Image (cartoon, rainbow, N blue to C red):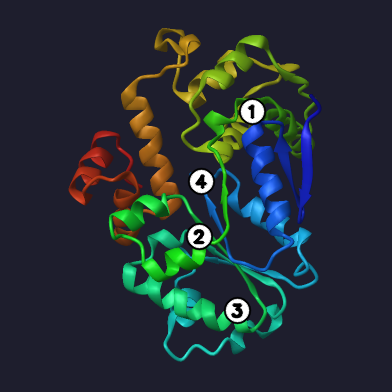
């Protein structure tokens, strides 16, 4: 089966898995409509990339796509959620699209404010995309997601599977990143050894595509050979033959450390960032602090 590749703004969507194909096909269908679109999937699965593809395929493509991160863009979120927000600040995006990243991290009150702001934004013919790495359906059942925003956001949903459920995409992505880093590092690495392929296919990828990219980058810095081998991967993945990796498993402590690190890289090491990371991991803040001390993850 040939590798599946579509252009999304200046980036590529690469893979050949059924889950990725379904997500892309969902974007193509949604591109013909004007309804809001919710992208759901774990952190670093490619939600923004797919939103960019949907925008490019839609009639809004002649105007810009504005990305607003609900975690990092605090000033912009505060401005948009303000009661007197009149959308004048978004004049240059009229007829385009706006993408609100990680809406589930907002408090219930702010989620409702966002819903009211989106009603105003729609009047400027700006199409809304939203994303969440948390399951908004479960959050709604637990009364942790605003019902008005839920009804608004769930009109059209694109599910993006995690990389561990898209095994067919791993090696095409590896080849893609090897090509990128060969140019950047002025190397001519041709690919992976069979043992290295087995390791990457067995790994669970808690950090999804971003983690894969980082691992290949580090491995290529280490390798001066024609192929990336197991020894170039083992230290970066924290594994060895004794870890039983050939059976697709790894120590639970190592998995926990990876998940903690991934959450903190996403939300930050500030107090607010740690609170959000704890909520995303479904643990208390005190438990998070204990685990940070245990794994020496404080910056």
Find the distance from the CA under tag 4 to the CA under tag 3. Answer: 25 Å
Residue 154: image tag: 2
Q: Secondary structure at mark 3?
A: helix
Q: CA distance from mark 3 to mark 2?
A: 16 Å
Residue at image location 42% in from the left, 88% down from the top:
83
Question: Residue 189's x, y, as percent?
Answer: 76, 23
Would you say residue 197 is visible in this rendering?
yes
Residue 249 percent across, percent down from the top left = 42, 17
Q: CA distance from mark 4 to mark 1?
A: 17 Å
Q: Secondary structure at mark 4?
A: loop
Percent of width and height locating residue 262 = 43, 42
Q: What residue is pinned by disc 3?
A: 122
160, above or below 76, in the image: above
Q: Earlier in the sequence, mark 4 or mark 1?
A: 4
Dot 1, crowdedness within 10 Å: few (<14), some or many (≥20)?
A: many
Sequence-first disc among 1 and 3: 3
* Residue placed under numbered mark 1 in the picture: 170
Of callouts 4 and 3, which one flags the residue occurring earlier in the amino acid sequence? 4
Q: CA distance from mark 1 to mark 3?
A: 38 Å
Residue that badge 4 annotates: 41
Left or right, 223 with respect to 296, comes to right
Left or right: where 280 falls relative to 198:
left
């Amino acid at each position: 089966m040939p590798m599946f590749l579509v252009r999304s703004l200046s980036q590529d969507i690469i893979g050949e898995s059924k889950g990725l194909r379904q997500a892309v096909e969902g974007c193509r269908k949604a591109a013909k409509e004007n309804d809001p679109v919710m992208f759901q999937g774990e952190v670093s699965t490619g939600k923004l990339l797919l939103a960019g593809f949907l925008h490019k395929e839609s009639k809004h493509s002649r105007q810009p796509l504005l990305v607003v991160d609900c975690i990092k863009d605090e000033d912009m979120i505060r401005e948009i959620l303000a009661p007197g927000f009149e959308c004048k600040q978004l004049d240059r995006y009229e007829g385009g699209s706006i993408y609100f990243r990680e809406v589930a991290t907002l408090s219930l009150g702010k989620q409702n404010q966002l819903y009211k702001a989106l009603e105003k934004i729609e009047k400027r013919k700006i199409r809304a995309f939203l994303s969440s790495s948390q399951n908004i359906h479960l959050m709604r059942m637990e009364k942790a997601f605003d019902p008005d925003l839920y009804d608004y956001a769930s009109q059209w949903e694109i599910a993006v599977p995690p990389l561990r459920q898209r095994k067919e995409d791993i090696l095409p992505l590896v080849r893609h990143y090897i090509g990128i880093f060969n140019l950047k590092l002025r190397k001519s690495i041709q690919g992976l050894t069979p043992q290295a392929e087995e390791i990457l296919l067995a790994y669970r990828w808690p950090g999804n595509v971003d983690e894969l990219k980082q691992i290949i980058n580090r491995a290529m810095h280490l390798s001066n050979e024609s192929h990336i081998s197991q020894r170039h991967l083992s230290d970066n993945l924290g594994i060895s033959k004794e870890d039983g990796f050939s059976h697709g498993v790894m120590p639970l402590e190592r998995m926990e450390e990876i998940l903690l690190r991934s959450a903190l890289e996403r939300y930050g090491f500030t107090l607010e960032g740690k609170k959000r990371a704890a909520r995303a991991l479904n643990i208390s803040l005190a438990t998070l602090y204990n685990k940070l001390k245990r794994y020496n993850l404080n910056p």
